[in-house]
Amino acid sequence: MNKTVKTAVALSVAHALYTLYALPAFAQEENEESIEVVEVQGFRSAVIKAKDLKRESLVAQDSIVAEDIADFPDLNLADSLQRVPGIAITREGGEGRQISLRGMGPQFTRVEVNGMEALGSSSSPMDSRGAVTRSRAFDFNIFASELFNQIDVKKSYSAEIEEGGIGGTVNLKTAKPFDFTGMKGVVGVQGGTNTNTDNFDNRLVGMLSNTWDNFGALASVAYSTRESREFGYNTYRWRKRSTSNYNEGLDANTAQLLEDGELWFSRGNRYSVWNNQQERLGITASLQYRPSDDLNISLDFLRGELNNTLDEHHISTGGSSSTALGRVEELEFIDNNGDKEVVYGRYSDTTIRTESREDYNESVFTQLTFSVDWNISEDFIANAQIGTSSSDYDQPKVNKANLMRPGSGITTDFTQDRFYGVNTYDFDPASLEGWLVKDLYFQEDYITNDFDNAKVDFKYFVGDTGTISFGANYKKFSNTGERRQDSGYVQSKETPLNNGVTTISSDVTNVYSDHPDQNWLELDMAKIHEFYGLSNLSLGEDKVVSTFAYDVEEETQALYGMYSWDSMLNDANFRGSVGLRYYNTELTSQGISGGEDIIMVRDYSGVLPTLNVVYEVSEDVLLRFSASKNLTRPSLSALSVSARVSQATLSEGDIGSVTIGNPSLKPYSSVNIDTSLESYFDGVGYFSVAVFYKDIKDFIVTETAAQTKTLEELSLPNSLLPNGGTPTTQFNVTTPQNSDSSTIKGFELAFQRDFDFLPEPFQNFGLIANYTWADGNSTYRNVQGSGEDQVKAFQGLSKSSYNLTLYYETDEWGARVSAAYRDRYISSVEAGLGDEDERGFHETTYVDFSAFYQVNESLKLNIEGINLTDEQEVQYSDSSDRQYNTTTSGRTFMAGATYRF
């Protein structure tokens, strides 16, 4: 690399690609001799260390250590986890958010932070991706990768692990001062941009650690800003509609189908843009006291903040049920799985709408953990932890402002691409003529999660090969939240703006021009609020939506006992454990239903047996087997006693949706079988094949009542009616229920090795590859309110997923390219809405690149390219596979430097 290039890269503000931590001394004394001694540094060193953790574990486990996270081009913690075999991620604005593990959706993976169970909450700006939800899914995008120096993904279960994760348990670990020797520090910067924006993004990181005899202190900070832009085309579902308002020139068959309501029309037909200015801050601190080799005391603090300032912009149709239907001039439809789907239409006398929206939300996670590790005697060890964590999600601002233009003409065309429509208008959407203010909307959301944990574990060594482990833990989890909303202010199109002038002025509007396919007129949020005297509006207690205000609290006590051994069988090492775990959970659910405060209290308990064995077929070949029982508790919203009314806008004849929770739900329970054959060889090398099977009982599905009802019949106030609803509007009523048993099965293949057998210079290449196949179905009741049950795949299950990384590394420089593939999957199954039976995402492949140059022992330069192919995220509607939302988030390029001292 010439001097000019070196200088250019160094001056491109950068960041420490998480090379800031060395691997901690995580091995216990009793197995230190079995851990491979590693002299190499950098990426290869990290991969070897992760391999050794996998090999020594009693449960099926994969790990990521510091350099491994550092050297992948990761925007956040979820992006780091996608490289683990069996893990697939969901994305927001081009970066990861939640994970699915071995085909099980995000709610089935339990997460620990520094050994304590925790829950982190953020949101999606898109309603189609879940928006603001109260689930058990952990949002990993709250954290930067730089905050953690080891991640363990435990895919099988043993008695000492807390219950709750049928999919598995992810343990996130921050560094401690005695992970290092003496003074250690690192500082780094990184900067870059995304092709969809013109903003300069930056990341800063710093860590300082020191030890003084038997005392140590460590602090680290990671800060980043990022601007993202997703744009594309979306329909927010398709719907059958009937009309007799059509051109007499239509052929008789098409006219009859129109009158009979047999044609499916796209709704919304929106060109859309979602912008986000993101700020992420992470802080860790650790104090450690080791007065002797037998006693270790530590106090660990972690804080993560994610702030999002969002704006979004849409131009859509607002005709019959948000379709383009006005007068039908031309139509073209296809047969799609028996449905007659309109792929081309020209319409007159319809309504066009534009929407501008501004949001602000912040997620704050805080945890404090006190730990004691004490070797009481040569044969007796005690470990104790007590801690508390909170995850607060505040969204004090969701403001929408809508324009409408009646009497317009539009052509919608899906003939060139069924998953990206093309709109043309018979007017200039950027002109002032014909537009009216439709309405203004305000919303606020607040969610709080609190965890209090305490646990103690004991190990007693029996003879030369046995260990008796036992312990107890207590945890209290509470989830509270509320929503406030208000709308209206401009009650109808007859309400004039600017002293009776029906055509609005440029004083309260602007032209939005950042979508590549169309410009359009929209309301200027600040100016329209000023016009109506609503600037800086804050919603009061009187605007709380009572049915969204509910509390759920769980208090759990658990005991476990386990016997472990490490012995010989047929002259080969044979180790394992057998154990039992007992738990008791008391659930309290409080909310409002039918206008009354309701508190429901119930408890449940159970015993979970576990067996894990590892047999060394030969010195470097392991046969692993696990059998266990585990559970996952229902989502928090499902346990609510409140009735929640969907606020989706309704047109005449539409049926609304009301969801009523069920605090009597049983947890999901599963019997799990895992087995694997693992072959290890020199350096980074290993090959493994794993097979897994889960038999899940009490699967939870949403059922729809046979009869629709009005809000009055449900004892709910009409103040909860969505836009377009009336006192006579009918609503489907859905309730979560425990249903049939289900199974999930699959296999994983993993391979990694250096190509050191090749001649120079190719011996510095290496490959890491893994592939996962999973299959699992469940019976969903009364899908679409049709009265029919349907068998479909698990929500969040991709049948196939793989990761490939090809790397080249020397002592001075290295580079690698990574690809992450995820097959299509279902995100939700519709219980009450007739528009679709399911919703999900098409397959994706994300390709990333990173490279480094080691200037000297202290200074390292790096470059990254993320999402090099600008992959489309395609969300589909219905098993007939219709377009719902198609977006791209752009390519990200970063460059940076890390300095160690």
Image (tube, rainbow, N blue to C red):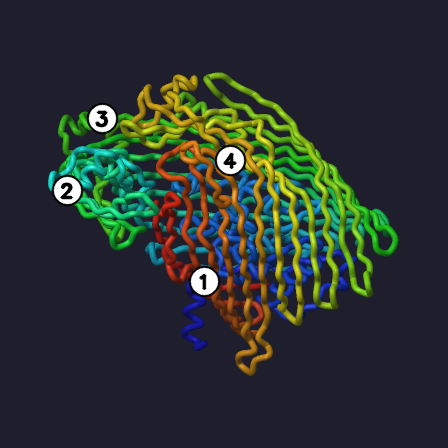
Asked if the residues shown at circle 4 and circle 2 are in contact, with their CB atoms under 8 angstroms apart, the answer is no
Which residue does the image show at 86% across and 52% down from the upper left? 378
Viewer-nearest of discs 4 and 2? 2
As drawn, the label of residue 250 is: 2
Alpha carbons under labels 3 and 2: distance apart: 33 Å
Indicate the amino acid at tag 2. Leu
Asked if the residues shown at circle 3 and circle 2 are in contact, with their CB atoms under 8 angstroms apart, the answer is no
Image quarter of residue 713: top left
Q: Mark 4, residues whose alpha carbon is within 10 Å: few (<14), some, or many (≥20)?
A: many
Q: Which badge, 4 or 2, is on the more N-terminal residue?
A: 2
- Regarding residue 189, the answer to whether it shows in the image is no
As drawn, the label of residue 492 is: 3
Q: Which badge, 4 or 3, is on the more N-terminal residue?
A: 3
Asked if the residues shown at circle 1 and circle 2 are in contact, with their CB atoms under 8 angstroms apart, the answer is no
Alpha carbons under labels 4 and 1: distance apart: 37 Å
Task: Give SS at disc 4.
Answer: strand
- Out of 422 and 302, give the one closest to the viewer: 422
Query: Viewed as shown, does residue 535 lie left or right of 394?
Result: left
Which residue does the image show at 69% across and 37% down from the upper left? 454
Residue holding disc 1: 848
Alpha carbons under labels 4 and 3: distance apart: 39 Å
Which residue does the image show at 79% across and 57% down from the upper left? 30
Task: Give SS at disc 2.
Answer: loop
As drawn, the label of residue 701 is: 4
